[in-house]
Image (cartoon, rainbow, N blue to C red):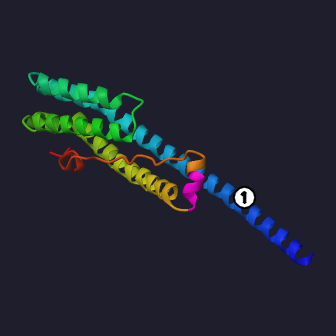
Amino acid sequence: MDIVLIVVIALGVIIVGTLIWAVATYNGFVRLRNLVQESWRQIDVELHRRHDLIPNLVETVKGYAAHERGVFDEVTTARAAAASSGTGPAQQAAQENQLTAALGRLFAVAEAYPQLRASENFAQLQTELATTEDRIAAGRRFYNANVRALNTKVESFPANVVANMFSFTRAEYFEIEDPAVRAAPRVGF
């Protein structure tokens, strides 16, 4: 009788401990998923800020270099693609790569106009864009750290059992692929 009672109590402790662990693991997944989503929203805010600065920058450069229509169209098209919603981090990174490349060409055009480089409005836009680029980079680091934590937990045993049971999946990193684009756009003249 004593052995049966001890076995029943031991099984009860094991079952309760397992349930507590499963609930804690599930809640950990929810917390990490929410951190990933929140950090992506912060990147999204900075990307929108960047997208809002670009038309002002284009208009400022247009005033000095009106004949560079192809560059302006390229920047406008790349901005529209990057500003479109509903994309994941990988697609957003590809669109941001195209936008950064187009901005690089816009700044190359601007270098040919000393009066533009001396313009207070252009200098202020450059500073705001550089600050925004820094914020995007910081946000990307924070987001990717949260993605790493979630992905590690999704793949680690025994937490992966809970992840599979409740359909928690790996998140996408927000990475810039092109080494030329990895450098921040040159905004200083």
In this view, the residue in front, 150 or 16, is 16
Q: Given the image, on which type of amino acid does mark 1 rest?
A: Leu
In this view, the residue in front, 52 or 19, is 19
Label 1 residue SS: helix
Q: Residues within 10 Å of mark 1 (few under 14, many from 20)?
A: few
Name the residue: 77% across, 62% down.
16
* Residue 120 seen in the figure: no
Q: Main secondary structure of the magenta part?
A: helix
Residue 144, image x and y in percent? 41, 52
Read off the residue under disc 1: 19
Quadrant placement of the C terminus? top left
Residue 31, image x and y in percent? 59, 51
Vertical relation: 116 (above or below) 136: above
Residue 170, image x and y in percent? 46, 49
Name the residue: 17% across, 39% down.
104
Residue numbers of the magenta segment:
158-163
Name the residue: 11% across, 38% down.
108
In this view, the residue in front, 140 or 17, is 17
- In this image, 73 relative to 50: left or right? left
Residue 163, image x and y in percent? 56, 51
Quadrant placement of the N terminus? bottom right
Vertical relation: 157 (above or below) 45: below
Name the residue: 45% across, 47% down.
171
In this view, the residue in front, 113 or 176, is 176
